Image: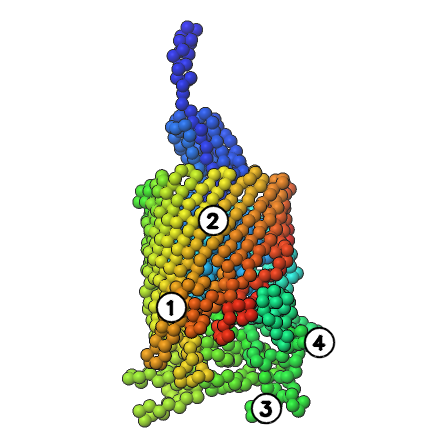
Amino acid sequence: MLRFITTLVLLFPILGFAQTSLVRGTVRDKVSEDVVPGALVSLGGNYKVLADDNGAFSFKDVPYGKYNMVVAAYDFDTVRMEITVKSKETVVNPELGGSTEIEEIKVIANISMDRKTPIAITKISAEQIAEELGSRDLPMLLNATPGVYATQTGGGDGDARITVRGFDQRNVGVLIDGVPVNDMENGAVYWSNWFGLDAITNQVQVQRGLGATKLSMPSVGGSMNIVTNGMHNRKGFSFKQEYGTGDFLRTSLSYNSGRTKKGWGFNFSGSYKQGNGWVEGTNTQGAFYYGKIQKSIKKHLISLSAFGAPQKHGQRSYYQPIQYWDSKIAEQMGVTVNPNAIMDRGIRFNQHWGYITNEDGKQEIKNERLNYYHKPQITLKDFWQVNKKLSISNIAYMSIGRGGGTRLANSGGILYTEDGHVDWNAIVKANQVDQLFGGPNIDPAYSSTELKSTQVLISSVNNHFWVGYLGQFQYELNPHWTVSGGIDYRYYKGSHYQQIVDMLGGDYYINTANFNDANPMKRKGDKIALNSYNSDRDAFVQWGGVFGSAEYSGNRWTAFINASAVVNTYKGVDYFQKKMLDLGDTVLRIGAKDTIQYHGNTYTASSPGLKDYATKWKAIPGATIKGGVSYTLNEESKIFANLGYLSRTPQFSNVIDNNTNTFFREIKNEIIQAIELGYSFSNKYVGVSVNGYFTNWKNKPFPYGVAIPDPNDPNASIYLNINGMDAIHYGGEMDVAYNIFKNLQAEVMLSVGNWTWNSAETFYVPELNYSFTFDAKGVHVGDAAQTMANFSLRYEPIKRLYFKVQYQWFDRYYAAFNPFYLQGANARREAWKLPSYGLLNAFAGYSMKVKKVNIFFNAMVSNILNSKFIADATDSYYAPYNSDAQSASVVFGQGLRFNLTLGVNF
């Protein structure tokens, strides 16, 4: 007994003064960086706690020492780590999902960690997509992102466009699972080709500015990285049914196996949609399919995926004067209404459709402007985690696009009904009945028995074939330094031609267009040239690039530097207008009707040795270097800076003149210089991100060249690639998220830019003895709102039930215009500034669990006040150039739209 008391006395000072620590942290998903609520965190076997709704956990009075921490959560692999407790407060932030696939996503998909990477990042989670997207195009969800402006343009399904910091989507890089998808001829992204992606998207990450993307991309304004689901995501089935405005119906089914015990993963999704559209005559029908098979073999993760979205939808192509849509609104904007011109059609009006009587005598809708396309993409990946330090990935992909868009061939001879729609029955009658004598419409000069169509429906076909390879490695030199690099190769062939798809009651059509066509008598299925641009041509582009980067990550400092080099090669082939004959000392260009005398010999289109008129391959190099650094001020805040220099190779449309299939006279790279500074703060109550940017864009060309009068033919134009147009884009962005209460969150976004042209030049063409002068210095860039704000509140009165309201404001929006036409009296003239507008949107949803089945309901209403606003506008290029509402051509945005979703997952 005495020995026991003595032992207690000796141990008392040690027990009484033992040092303890507060151990706390936040559990996050390693891919999305979202918090993981409800995770079970164990420490040393004696401490256990569940992470709260913000993923936060804490242990009080933990004695100093070494402990094993175990973190487990549903659908995640259990994470085990050893930690050392040796200070009054120990912060540990476990990350779940540390599988090989997670590393693959980080390496291949160019996903950046917003807590570490020194760039401006906005993430759109799968949860936000499910709550807010509804039946809208994916870009419309991004209007709450700083610096991003998106519209539905004419209102057709899939016709959305997006600008980032004033740069259109031709200058915004888009990747799906690390594979670039911008069109290789013009850089555009056609969102109708990507219908259904929301069903399989794990997250969308928007990197504004040059970003940290390793590939050489057209990301002047920013980049969008879309990451799809895989075996690391929640396993199970999902089924949902949607109903929305315009009798929109969509049915979707998805399955994800998760990771099986034998290392397999299966992910399949399918969707079907149909609807009539908010704009009349924009009916839509489409399907989506997606399949991904993954297999983990030792240190390899092999993945084969394929997806596509065959679709067709009606379009509204023309911008019109304001009075065309609504004369009262026009008068309010100062327009002098012309009573002799069309007015008050209504903002949902669309002139590109009408009714036609079918063979059964019934009336059915027929679109004049119908877009149809199918662009399947197949990707094969091998990600090899060689060891803890080294990973190597190889990606091969292929895309085959088939489709186009229809229109009537004779735009000046379209017959309309009294209410302004296409009168298809009158067109058919005009093709079949002679309008003067009443008999069959027969022209003996071509055929004594067949009907001669005076109007036909044609399609501008735009097919493509695209293959690519992307190989890269990443190596961890030490705990602080990581290096990576790789190669990027792409081959693209685009085929463009016009083709008759409907004779509209006749048997043949005579092409009276002024082109060199040896056989003007055309029938259904025949190629036809109504203009030089889409006559019958192929565009070839090859892209070869190398890239390398180094990243540093320390306790407080992180940094990266990235360099890339690329060589673009271009070639054009014209099958219609000209043939060529290489005679050694010269090359003769011979049209289908030409007779050419050369050195005493006569050459025609039937002469031997003729080839399709093709350019040679032209190679143009480019390069990028960019870097950034961030410094963690404390656990809650950091500052960052990045800068970059980009010598960007021109797009195909600024290398080869599609009208003549010849190289433009002056071809220069675009030069982009950018710098950005930012600050961020976050804790469990509030998150704030503030950044400022400055981008100097030099030598910005106008797509497809600038038309100038042909000195040899006053009725014709020639196209020049005019260099020297510079622009300066600078501005500031702020994004705030605040947890007012546990169940009430607020978000505020403000973006203010000042984007102006910065050039005044005289361009001289000596061989034409022609000078071209423009002065756009200080004129604001058009086509996007330069001031944008967003405010939203999300409230959960009870668990699994939410309500959200969102108000968006757009201001300082200048109409689109061609700055090269700011000449003479129009020099430095500002474009028309559209009226500012605001939109109120509302969202709600509820989910409930019945055993293992989750039943959910979501509702979305956009523009709940049914506000009338002008979403897109262009200024007249020609005199009188008033830069006001009188001369502008516009299209109104969409009014109230709703979408209801009912679904289950298990």
Q: Residue 28: where, in percent of width, then height?
A: 47, 41
Is residue 147 placed above or below 25 in the rendered structure?
A: below
Q: Are marks 2 and 3 in contact (CB under 8 Å)?
A: no
Residue annotated with mark 2 = 734
Cα separation between marks 2 and 1: 33 Å
Cα separation between marks 4 and 3: 28 Å
Secondary-structure class at tag 1: strand
Residue annotated with mark 3 = 443
Q: Residue 207: where, in percent of width, then height?
A: 44, 53
The amino acid on which the numbered mark 3 sits, given as a three-letter code, is Asp
Q: Report the mark closest to the observer, 2 or 4.
A: 2
Q: Report the mark closest to the observer, 2 or 3.
A: 2
Residue annotated with mark 4 = 361
- Residue drawn 42% across and 51% down? 692
Q: Report the mark closest to the observer, 4 or 3.
A: 3
Q: Which of marks 4 and 3 is nearer the N terminus?
A: 4
The amino acid on which the numbered mark 2 sits, given as a three-letter code, is Met
Residue annotated with mark 1 = 760
Q: Which of marks 1 and 4 is nearer the N terminus?
A: 4
Judge the density around disc 4: few (<14), some (14-19), many (≥20) Cα neighbours within 10 Å.
few
Q: Residue 783: where, in percent of width, then height?
A: 49, 63
Secondary-structure class at tag 2: strand
Q: Which of marks 2 and 1 is nearer the N terminus?
A: 2
